[in-house]
Amino acid sequence: MTHTQASKYGLLSFAHHHIKRTLLPLREKLAECRMRDNKTIAQRWQNMRVEKRRVYTRLLSGLAAVLLSLTYAMPSFADDSDTLNIYIWGGEVPDDVIQAFQKETGITVNYSTYDNNETLYAKLTAVGNPGYDIIEPSSYYVERMRSVGILQKLDKSRLVNWHYLNPELLNKSYDPGQEYSIPHLWGITGIFVNDKYYDPTKITSWKDLWNPAYRNKLLMLNDLREVFSVSLLTLGLNPNTSDPAEIKAAYKLLKTLSPNVKLYIDDTVISIITDEDATIGMAWNGDVYKAMQSNSHVHFIFPSEGYMVWSDNFAIAKGAPHLDNAYKFLNYLMRPDIAAKVTIEEGYPTANLEAEKLLPASYRNSPIIYPNNAVLDKATFETDITDQSLSVYAHYWELLKLES
Amino acid sequence: MKPSGPETEKTGIAASIYTYAVYLFFYIPILILIVYSFNDATYSVTWKGFTLDWYRVLFQDTNLWIAALHSLILAISASMAAAFFGTLAAISLFRYQFFGKKLVHGLVFILIVTPDIVTGIALLLLFSLFHLPLGFWSLLLAHISFCLPFVVVTVYARMSGLDKNIFEAARDLGARDLTIFGKIIIPLLMPAIIAGWLLSFTLSLDDVMISYFVSGPGFEILPLKIYALARLGVKPELNALCTIIFVITMSFVVIAQRLQRKQP
């Protein structure tokens, strides 16, 4: 570092001294020249013009290089009919599925991802749809987006593979009549437990988490609706409640759970369970299933009071510029072989009933990832609540976090 | 480390331990990331054995590479444009008098301290006002605008260190403005321009906040992609990608140092 600086300053002072030293004699010489010989002046003038041109050329070529790189990089503004813009959850459609779709149809897929519904919602509502065709809101966000009118009603006559979908997951309160959304992947929030530390047969309900034996052991999801649903379900209340009194009661119960909570987290849950950094707590079934692949001591329990179920659903954004391609893509993803492939690669249960039959037995026979319909009957979909109710939740959520 | 440098004093053991501790603090996370890119486990963060699988997976993930390419193109274009316009701005701020010069100069610093989120929303509103589709061009304009002040400041600082007599001398010798610009100012400012360019390149390459607001459907860039993927559990292939980026950056630094050493 010092070396280069020295050389830079060396250059600077060299130029400085050089010009100073030659300044006086040259000035005299110049005056002489000017008086003595007009031709020299003409020559100098000529030189300067050449110089000027050279500088211009240099500047222009620099600019040209910039522009050239820009035009090279310019995305396909020209031909737009063969593209499809999708904006979906990261890690829910594998890359090779998209590659295969592109190969099969000749459609170029512009694939962007997000990591939470708020991001998607903000992007679509800030200044209107910037050009996305297919989006993937979670169930309760379908409800919100539908109500503010930023989803395009699905034309089911164009969705030829619709009949493969699992009817158990259709027609829920977040989208009555399933007019706007197509469930893609789904999951359940339950309890995980490591049998090296605790006896899994002794845990059957959410209530068991309050057992003083689990002091400072529980992993809780860092998600206010999920955590409150545990308490609301334990109290026998509706986990989608908007009643401030019920929310307060749930908070009071959660406060008594605080001594048992080790941490609130919603990312890297899989590694925490796998590495036994947490040995009991709440988790999504998909995460637990993945953790079980490398740690056979992990178990998943469907709490007897009931549990929340989520689904991430494809929808067409209003103002989608490539409607035809969007339908092609949706049909493609509803193909049983493709849906099965998605589930195998991404590790979440599919909403495609026909695809379940194509799954390897290890998936199909796993009650964790493929609970039977009786188990699904006890599940409650998380529905959207008003911002006002959400702020009540948020208030108590903050209190809970502050006190823990 | 060069003996020809300024006289160095022996420091105490405590001081050198302290220095090494600081460096360890900086580099341990990167080292851990590199180690994990070879770990034979998808989710576990304990060591399960050596594998090159994640690199294989990475090379097959074309979407990630497209995003990386997009980021690179964007960073190069934005930093070059920022270096070009920023240099011109710094020179005119330094050399010429014009109405509102002090204000303009002050505004440059305000741009630097403005939170990204404000810049992001402001740009998004501006683009939507002019119906500029969100995508490459909106990203480019946004990146140029947040890189620009850094170039201006770097170049301006060096410019203030120059001896004004040089310009006068050149003018006395008959050089016109353009000659002075091309033959004297630019070469003398070159280190600052390159520094500003590199700064812009880095800023552009890892910007998430502003890019989030102004990115559109057609042009996914790497920081946004990594950000979206990381929350759902960092896939080891991301570690592999970051390792490759780190190795490339390191080799650039090494090459640059070698080149400088060769100079007289």
Image (tube, coloured by chain):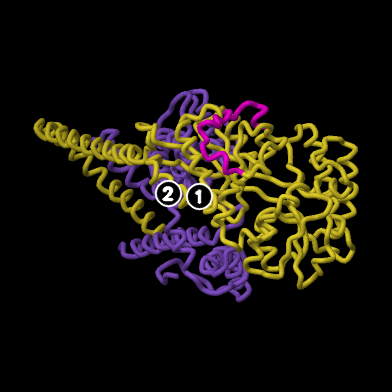
Chain colours: A yellow, B purple
Residue A237 placement: quadrant: top right
What is the quadrant of the N terminus of chain B in the image? bottom left
Q: Is residue A155 magenta?
A: yes
Residue A149: % across, % down = 63, 26
Q: Does the image show residue A51? A: yes
Question: Which label is found at residue A40?
Answer: none
Callouts 1 and 2 close, C-beta under 8 Å: yes
Q: What residue sits right under mark 2 in the picture? A: A100
Residue drawn at 31 percent across, 50 percent down = A15
Magenta-drawn segment: A144-165
Q: Position of residue B184 (x, y in %)?
A: 31, 43
**Tag 2 subunit:** A
Label 2 residue SS: helix
Tag 1 secondary structure: helix
Label 2: few (<14), some (14–19) or many (≥20) C-alpha neighbours in 10 Å: few
Please report, as a chain letter, where disc 1 is located.
A
Q: Residue at x 48, y 31 (%)?
A: A323
Q: Amino acid at mark 2?
A: Ala
List the residue tagged with mark 1: A338
Q: Give A304 or A227, whichever is nearer the viewer.
A: A304
